[in-house]
Amino acid sequence: MSHKPERANDQGQKKRKRKKRTKQTITCAVTHIRLIEANPGKLAALDQLLEVYLPLCQQYVALFCTQETLPDKYADPVFATVLSDRLHRVAMQQAAGIAKSWRTNRQAAYDAYLEDLADYAEAKTQATASGMPLDPKRIEPTWKEWNLPELRVPAIQANANVVAVEQSEDSTFDYWLRISTLDKGNPLHIPVKLAPYHKKALQGRTLNTSTTLHKRKGVWWLTLSFDLDVPVETESSAQKVGVDVGIANFITTSTGKKYGSFHGKLARRHTRDREKRRRKARLRACLKKKGVEKLPSTSSASGQRLGRHVRQEINRAVNQMIADHPNARIIYEDLSVASMRFKARSMNAYLYASNLAHIPEQIAWATAKRGMAAHTVKAAYSSQECQRCHYPDRANRPDQQTFKCILCGHRDHADHNAALNLARRFGDTELAACKNKGEVKTRLLRRHEEWKKQYGLAVVQPAVQLGLWDYSEASTDVAESEKAHQCNI
Ligand SMILES: [Zn+2]
């Protein structure tokens, strides 16, 4: 049985859909509101609640992540608890949210792994067929199963059923929080005093009914939020600007501009941080051998600072890019953290990957805030596809920076070529309908065929053509064309 509340009628839904095109709704969070204790012992009730709430939430996270069916926050409760039904439901909703994003990310990573594996197998078959050894730099991809998510920071993502925000009657405080706890029928009342900058942010806004309470280093914090409707100002005729996300340059646009980089200062800082962590690990190993029980922590403050610094640099790059293209329609890659990892393959993948993922997030946020239209498009082969003749091949990328089409000879900076491809993919319903990378490649190869019919003869040397063009329309599948390009090399 589902406990899903009734939804608005169909007409209301249609209305919402129509509205979506002219404005975007963004949710703004007001964070770091410290909960103050009006009288001693009050917050202790919150601590007690947490002791029951968190394990229950964790139980549901494990269930929702591992069960076959998708997480359903309205499903029947299955675990016993002393919590009220309302708090129980809130714990399930929080767990369902965590499980949903974990499952999506894990699936994306697994799909990326499978595609990488297929790619590797194909390269290996080719190598065997041609009698040439496989590029020693290519390593067979492996899959390591993900751990289930753990609730590290104690937090309660509540709704108005369990945490109500009430306007304060007198001027001493701004709000009162009415929080349901283990003591049924006897809610906790906690005053909220806003800092001037919180007040400014919330002025004239209608608060959302969802709130978050979390505890860090013994202090309870409240997060409030409100929705903001931002009209979309971008004209339908606006210039389409493609945005490629990378490491050498955080952002390269189809207009030929570059913003931010992992190289230079950030890379040096990263190296220092890594050395520090290695030293610490050696020290831990040494102490462990000697039987020391209390080992120095593995968390690295400098690593966290570095992460913050990278995100600041990313924000700066995104803002600069937007300032340079104020009237454009931004088209960027639909990249998951997993595919980022593949993009960062040859580099120190993991650190870069987690930070690279901040770039599309920041693009989405920064454009929405300004009422700019921004869209994601399929990223598959955008860095390998030739911007001129559509031919997609790893060999088109002799090195990280260079794009050189092995068929038509088109040359460009690799990131610029990719950005142009992305810009062109906006509104490309054929590519959008492709279900996997293989379908994208087949489609691009077909486009290459069409291009060739139109322009091919003028560009390619006749000697190459004989071996290359001599396959029928029906055989434009991946294997055939791979063979064809081998002849070319
Ligand atoms: Zn080409």
Image (cartoon, rainbow, N blue to C red):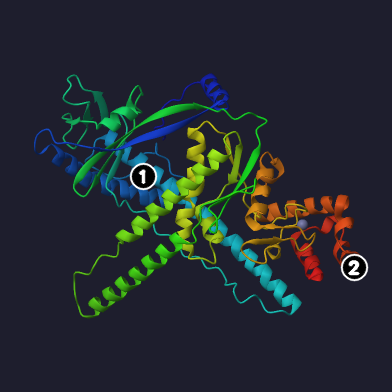
- Measuring from the top left, give residue 37's x and y in whole percent: 14, 36
Tag of residue 95 = 1
| Disc marking residue 463 | 2
Q: Nearer the viewer, residue 424 or 256?
A: 256
Residue 18 at x, y percent in the picture = 57, 23
Q: Residues within 10 Å of mark 1 (few under 14, many from 20)?
A: many
* Residue 4: quadrant of the picture: top left
x%, y% of residue 181? 20, 36
- Contact between marks 2 and 1 (CB within 8 A): the answer is no
As shown in the figure, which amino acid type bears the numbered disc 1?
Answer: Ala
Q: Horizontal placement of 50 versus 211: left or right?
A: left
Residue displayed at 54% across by 67% down: 346
Q: Would residue 95 be found to the left or right of residue 460 on screen?
A: left
- Residue at position x 31%, y 76% in the image: 282
Q: Nearer the viewer, residue 181 or 305?
A: 305
- Does 55 sit left or right of 76 as displayed? left
Q: Which quarter of the picture shows residue 28?
A: top left
The nearer-to-camera label among 2 and 1 is 2
- The answer to whether residue 68 is seen in the rendering is no
Q: Tag count in the figure?
A: 2
How far is the residue under mark 2 from the one under mark 1?
63 Å
Residue plotted at (72% across, 52% down): 387
In the image, 301: left or right of 429? left
State the quadrant of the C terminus: bottom right
Please state the horizontal and vertical placement of residue 126, each as a whole percent of the image.
72, 72
Q: Quadrant of the N terminus?
A: top left
Q: Is residue 114 visible?
A: yes
